[in-house]
Amino acid sequence: QQRGREQRADWRLAREQFGLLESAAQGADVIVATVTCPAAATVAHVVGARFFWAGYQPQVLPSKTLPPMLFAPPWLPSWAWPVSWRLYLGALAIAVGGVLDEEREKRGLSTGHGFDELVRAAPWLCAFDEALSPVPADWDVERHVTGFWFYDDDAPLSDELARFLDDGDAPAFVSFGSMPNDDPRATTAAIDE
């Protein structure tokens, strides 16, 4: 539920993204964004930057072999995935289509493309490992599989954290990234077992 509220907030902020990103992107050579930043492709065009979409899993573009992330509950049979994709893309079009057209028109750009068309118009950086999540064979977009992205920071650890790590056994860290979880207590109990 929380994840759904966060995503709805992202789309409501779509109009605000144009002004903020356009200001921040002045002088940029490249802009990379996920679909939660629908302003990015337009802003890249306006500021003359090269643009790439980024996907952290292959369920960001329609495929007959994968369901969409948000419109396909786990129990949904694979034969229903194409309908789920149409619902997903229709929801995106309703959520941001009007804003995209208005903002593109303000900047003297063509309108009426639809979010689906804009998402397919730029290359994709696939930030996942093909051994774990293969790129669907039916994707019809330019793509570059980069593997996972890591942030390396050479900054020293705080004294408090260094002491914690030096005391006792090495800690174990379990994370599911930004995946939603309807029952975190049950998940924690399962991990503890």
Image (cartoon, rainbow, N blue to C red):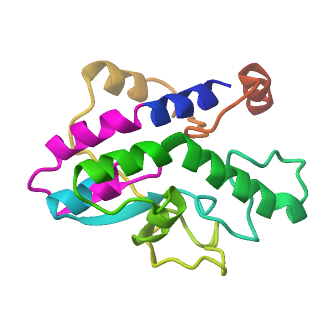
Q: Give 87 or 141, whichever is nearer the viewer.
A: 87
Task: Indicate the position of residue 67 as horizontal and vertical percent values.
Answer: 74, 58
Q: Give 155 or 137, whichever is nearer the viewer.
A: 137
Task: Indicate the position of residue 39 as horizontal and vertical percent values.
Answer: 35, 48
Q: In the drawing, does residue 18 fall left or right of residue 111?
A: left
Residue at 54% x, 34% y: name it.
Answer: 7
Q: In the drawing, does residue 45 fall left or right of residue 162?
A: left
Give the residue furthest to the left.
Answer: 27
Q: Is residue 20 magenta?
A: yes
Position of the C terminus by quadrant:
top right
Which image quarter: residue 70?
A: top right
Q: Is residue 38 visible?
A: no
Judge whether 169 appears above or below 163 on screen.
below
Judge whether 166 appears above or below 143 on screen.
above
Task: Indicate the position of residue 148 as horizontal and vertical percent values.
Answer: 46, 60
Residue at 26% x, 45% y: name it.
Answer: 153
Q: In the drawing, does residue 109 fall left or right of residue 126?
A: left
Q: Is residue 17 magenta?
A: yes
Magenta stretch in the rendered image: 13-42
Residue at 41% x, 22% y: name it.
Answer: 164
Task: Indicate the position of residue 155 as horizontal and vertical percent values.
Answer: 20, 38
Q: Is residue 41 visible?
A: yes
